[in-house]
């Protein structure tokens, strides 16, 4: 996992616990065979893909009703 991607993604999802949960869930989806939402290169791991998807706005978290 590239640290610069973590820094960029943490600017979008500021709560570290939520960021970890979102990345973990997306990595699990990718490992189960879901297609990446971005163009990838062979050197990218699942965590790098998940972080890049967050940075590019392809993966977002929904806010609960009332917020």
Image: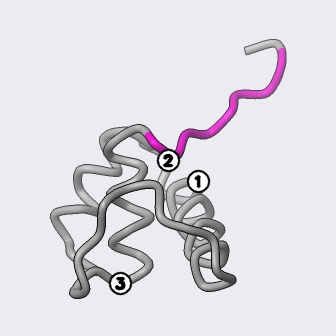
Disc 3 crowd, CA 10 A, few/some/many (<14, 14-19, 20+): some
Residue ID at (66%, 72%): 29
Kind of element beneath mark 3: loop
Front residue of 39/1: it is 39
Does 31 lie within the magenta span? no
Q: Are marks 2 and 3 in contact (CB under 8 Å)?
A: no
Main SS type for the magenta part? loop
Q: Secondary structure at mark 2?
A: loop
List the residue tagged with mark 2. Answer: 15
- Proximity of marks 1 and 2: CB atoms separated by less than 8 Å: yes
Residue 45 vs 5, above or below: the answer is below
Answer above or below: position of 25 versus 57: below
Q: Secondary structure at mark 1?
A: helix
Compare residues 15 and 12 and report the one nearer the observer: 12
Residue under label 3: 45
| Residue 42 badge | none
Say above or below: 64 vs 19: above
Category of crowding for the residue at label 1, using alpha-carbon neighbours closer than 10 angstroms: few (below 14), some (14–19), many (at least 20): few
Q: CA distance from mark 2 to mark 3?
A: 23 Å
Residue 26 as seen in the image, left or right of residue 19: right
Q: Quadrant of the N terminus?
A: bottom left
Q: How many marks?
A: 3
Q: Percent from the top left, x then y, of residue 43?
A: 21, 87
| Left or right: 28 as drawn, with respect to 66 | left
The stretch in magenta equals 58-65
């Amino acid at each position: 996992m590239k640290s610069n991607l973590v820094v960029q993604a943490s600017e979008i999802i500021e709560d570290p616990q939520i960021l970890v949960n979102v990345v973990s869930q997306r990595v699990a989806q990718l490992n189960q065979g879901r297609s990446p939402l971005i163009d990838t290169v062979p050197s990218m791991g699942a965590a790098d893909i998940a972080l890049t998807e967050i940075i590019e706005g392809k993966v977002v978290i929904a806010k609960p009703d009332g917020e």
